[in-house]
Structures are given as C-alpha cells and as structure tokens.
Image (cartoon, rainbow, N blue to C red):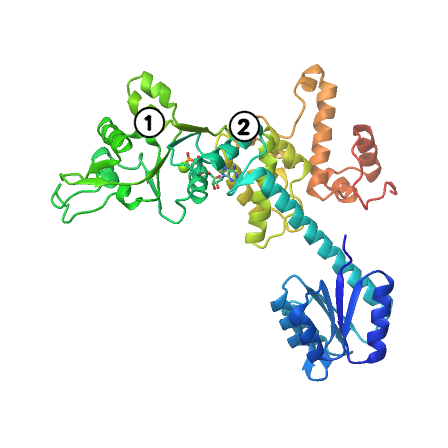
C-alpha cells in the first residue's frame, strides 16, 4: 500500500526539520511548509492524508488552515501543535474537525505515535470503502442486495430488461422487495428522467380504481366537477407500477388489457381516445396462474402481464442473504442514528440464520431498527436487542408469546435431541446455554458473570472448562478466589 502523505507546517526551522526527518525515517511521504501562505499554496494543488500544523503561524493561524484543509480535502486528518496552556483552542480545533493535538514541548516518539494512529484509522477507512464498493458492486444493484443464486439471477434479469419496454410481473410474498425492484427497473431504464407512478390496486374500490387509473371527464359521476387525468396519463413516457395487481376487478381487467394491446383508452365518462407511452411494471403476492384457473383473473391479461416474470424468493429460502442485508442495514441505521453499534454477536447471528422471517426483508429491517435503538454503543447486537424483550429467554427470562423467535422455539436452548436423551445431558445443555447467555450479557467478564450466577469464580471457571467455553480476550484464566 502507498505510504500516507504528510504535510508539516511549522515556522520554527529546527522543529520542522526534526519532524520531517522523524516521519521520513519511518517511511511517510513527507512535505513541509514554513508559513501559512506557503501551506495554502501547497494545499491548493495537493491533497495529503495527514496535515500537522502549528497553531500559531506567521501570517495565518492553524485554525483557519484546518478549515481550508477540511474544505479542500475532507478525508485529510489534521493534527495540531499547540503551546502549553492553550487547551481551549485545542478543544475548538477538535470541534472544527481536527483529529488530535500535541502540546509543546513534545518528543518525536509522541508525535510518531499519534501519526501512526491516524494512519491506521485512514487505512481502516480505506479498507471499509474498498469492501463496501466490492460488496455493492458484486452483490447489489440499485440498493437491492443479494448473493443467493436466485437473487443474483433476479439482479441480472433486472439489469437486462430495464433497457427494454417489456412488461414485468414481480411476484413475491409481502416484504420480499417487490417495490424495490420496481424502483430499480425504472431508475435504470431510459425512462428514468420521466415519472414513476405507483398505484396500489388493493387500496381502492373498483369504480374509484378505474377513475384513478384512466382519469375521468367532467360530470362523469357525481362529484366529478372537472376533467381529471388518470395515472396512465401521468406516467406518460415513464413507468407505471401497479401494485397488488391480483386484486383488480373484471371490469378493470378488460380496460387494462386494451391499453396493453392498443396503448390507448378513454377516460371514464368520455369518448376521446387517449394514447400513452407507458412501461408497465406489476406486482403481486398471489399466484396469478391459480387465480386464472379459478376464473378470477383473465388468462389473456395474465399472459400480457407476465412477459418478464421476476420471482422474489422468501427470505427463509435465501439465508445467505440474511446477514448480508442485515449487516448492511445495521451499518446504515447506526450511521443514520449516530449510534455506533458494532455488529451481530455470535448468538444474534445464529438466531437470524435460523429464524423463518414470515415478514421477509421488511421484518428484518424492523428488527434491525429495534436492535440499533436498544443496542449499546460500541458493542455487538444481542438476541434480546433483536427481539426487544428484556425478559428474553436468552437473558434467563421466560418465553414470550408475541416473540417470533420464541414461537419458533429459538429460545436459546439449543438442544432438543440431547434434551430427550437424558435429564443429565439436558441439564448440562441448559446450564451451558445459560452461562453463555450471562457471559454475553456482561461482555465476557467471568468475575461479573460469577457474581450474577451466584457461583464462585472457581466454580464458574470449572464449568466453562467442562463446556468448552473460552475466556474472552483480556480476561485472565487465573482463578484467584
Ligand atoms: N434485497 C434487498 N436488499 C435490501 N433491502 C431490501 C431488499 N429487499 C427488500 N428490502 C427492503 O425491505 C423493505 C420491504 O421491501 P418492499 O417494500 O419492496 O417489499 P414488497 O415486496 O413491496 O412488500 P409488500 O408486498 O408488503 O408491499 C424495504 O424497505 C426495502 O428497501
Ligand atoms: Mg410493496
């Protein structure tokens, strides 16, 4: 990897040179300026990973340089050198976005330590960016994430058909991403600069839906005081998304069929023929084929709509996507709410991977929102953050009737067959789970866990050893009573 570039700004020649030499010696790409003006000139045509500037400079000051630097290159990190006693200015500098400050007099070792820390942060940020780009490029399209084979086929299909005007029928259970796909189809199509109009066909009764879609003439019905254009007209040159298409009545089905065949229709209560250029995208949770067989949906319309079918599998059939989508949503939510939860704990991951998600991705999304709200900053999300019950069985509480995990038997007690084997093994299994749960709750501290469990540290240590529970990092295995 390229060595981080550093700009040193200090008017004292000796200081400047010592810093220059010290940083060069450990491999940084170092440049130096003696005054604020000189620094501004350099900064106007170069960017640096790290800028180290004295707070007091002839002709300018470190704070304004800090601002210039942050404006020009927000990714640069600035370290300020302050005189002894100017802590307030240093605090102000941190507010303005400085990474850190050193107080004079300081040793080169101290400076090197800070610069080293900054460059590690920069490297990490770079790595995150690279990973995100890789992830987004490979496993996502227009915000739809998925690495499951069927989802990758879906993503590929969307990219291929978005360039065409073919009618697309999106089929999937509630919350599987049908609207997201419709958005993606429009946004990546040549129609993207025109409107994407959405209509939920289930939300309106038949007559209203007809008027909503095709518009009406003045006086077409009581209350129709003037002519009104319908959604088809509003979507001219763009895309019309008809959600829950399986709900439309026979009358509307006929009218829709005609628009698809002839690209024209009449407004309700009128004779004037209106022509439109609309790309149609429909979605349904229903099995339309079955609806056709049962005589509720016109077969000819079905074939017209089902030109390009996009089938979204339920989330339980693409478990490899659960963590991919979950992690992404967790990071996005954490950033949005400025609550830096870390990731999912081992047990939270296990739960997510075993749960059936009847509400699909939308349920996962709500769960993540709850977990970020309830989770602790700088810590991993735990099972009880996901379900939101403080009396979660994972915490030693009881089963919750309204909890999805509990109703699927995901109560933290993993053993089922073992439990049936014998009472002893069932007890052990339970004990192991229980200890794991408590340890997780107290962040791995055995001292704290033994207190909560009412066990001596030695007894807990022995149990952990028996059950193969490793001690957490930073905790010694020393039993010391
Ligand atoms: N593959 C995915 N990647 C990322 N986010 C997704 C994915 N699928 C769905 N989502 C998100 O999940 C939520 C639900 O998706 P959407 O509204 O598109 O589902 P739907 O199939 O239209 O549901 P319904 O049938 O209930 O209307 C949205 O917030 C959406 O952004
Ligand atoms: Mg929807």
* Residue, far bottom: 59
- Residue name at image x 36 percent, y 19 percent: 290
Q: Is mark 2 within 8 Å of ligand 1?
A: no
Q: Is residue 409 above or below residue 126?
A: above
Residue 395 image point, x, y percent = 64, 37
- Residue 24 lies, with reference to residue 477, above or below; the image says below
**79 relative to 439, above or below:** below
Of label 1 and label 2, which has the lower sequence position? 2
Q: Name the quadrant where ligand 2 sits.
A: top left
* Residue at image coords 58%, 26%: 409
Q: Which mark is residue 304?
A: 1
Q: Which residue is mark 2?
A: 150
Residue 331 in the image, given as x and y percentages of width and height: 60, 47
Image point (68%, 67%), residue name? 46
> In terms of secondary structure, where does tag 1 sit?
helix
Q: Nearer the viewer, residue 435 or 110?
A: 110
Separation of residues labelled 1 and 2 (CA atoms): 24 Å
Q: Nearer the viewer, residue 271 or 317?
A: 271
Q: 225 or 25: nearer the eye?
A: 25
How far from the left and from the top, in percent, is residue 179? 42, 38
């Amino acid at each position: 990897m390229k060595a981080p570039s550093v700009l040193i700004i200090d008017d004292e020649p000796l200081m400047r040179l010592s810093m220059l030499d010290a940083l060069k010696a450990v491999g940084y790409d170092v440049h130096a300026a003696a005054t604020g003006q000189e620094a501004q000139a350099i900064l106007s045509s170069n960017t640096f990973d790290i800028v180290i500037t004295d707070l007091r400079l002839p002709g300018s000051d470190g704070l304004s340089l800090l601002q210039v630097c942050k404006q020009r290159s927000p990714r640069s990190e600035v370290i300020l050198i302050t005189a002894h006693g100017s802590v307030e200015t240093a605090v102000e500098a941190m507010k303005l976005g400085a990474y850190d400050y050193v107080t004079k007099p300081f040793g080169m070792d101290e400076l090197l330590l800070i610069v080293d820390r900054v460059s590690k942060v920069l490297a990490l940020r770079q790595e995150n960016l690279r990973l995100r780009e890789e992830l987004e490029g490979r496993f996502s399209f227009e915000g739809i994430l998925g690495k499951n084979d069927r989802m990758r086929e879906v993503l590929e299909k969307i990219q291929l058909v978005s360039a065409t005007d073919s009618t697309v029928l999106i089929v999937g259970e509630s919350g599987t991403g049908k609207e997201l796909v419709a958005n993606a189809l429009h946004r990546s199509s040549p129609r993207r600069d025109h409107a994407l109009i959405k209509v939920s066909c289930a939300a309106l009764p038949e007559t209203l839906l007809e008027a909503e879609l095709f518009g009406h003439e003045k006086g077409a019905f009581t209350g129709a005081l003037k002519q009104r254009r319908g959604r088809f007209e509003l979507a001219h040159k763009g895309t019309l998304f008809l959600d829950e298409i399986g709900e439309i009545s026979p009358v509307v089905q006929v009218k829709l069929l005609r628009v698809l065949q002839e690209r024209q229709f009449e407004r309700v209560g009128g004779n004037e023929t209106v022509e439109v250029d609309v790309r149609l995208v429909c979605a349904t949770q229903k099995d339309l084929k079955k609806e056709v067989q049962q005589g509720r949906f016109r077969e000819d319309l079905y074939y017209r709509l089902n030109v390009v079918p996009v089938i979204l599998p339920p989330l339980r059939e693409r478990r490899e996507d659960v963590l991919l989508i979950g992690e992404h949503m967790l990071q996005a939510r954490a950033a949005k709410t400025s609550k830096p939860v870390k990731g999912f704990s081992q047990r939270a991951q296990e739960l997510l991977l075993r749960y059936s998600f009847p509400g699909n991705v939308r349920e996962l999304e709500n769960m993540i929102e709850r977990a970020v709200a309830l989770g602790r900053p700088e810590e991993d999300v735990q099972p009880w953050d996901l379900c939101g019950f403080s009396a979660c069985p994972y915490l030693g509480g009881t089963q919750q009737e309204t909890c999805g995990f509990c109703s699927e038997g995901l109560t933290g007690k993993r053993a089922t067959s073992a439990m049936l084997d014998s009472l002893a093994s069932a007890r052990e299994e339970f004990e192991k789970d229980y200890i794991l749960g408590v340890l997780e709750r107290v962040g791995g501290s055995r001292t704290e866990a033994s207190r909560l469990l009412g066990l001596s540290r030695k007894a807990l240590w022995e149990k952990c050893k028996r059950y193969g529970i490793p001690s957490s990092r930073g905790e010694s295995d020393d039993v010391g009573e």
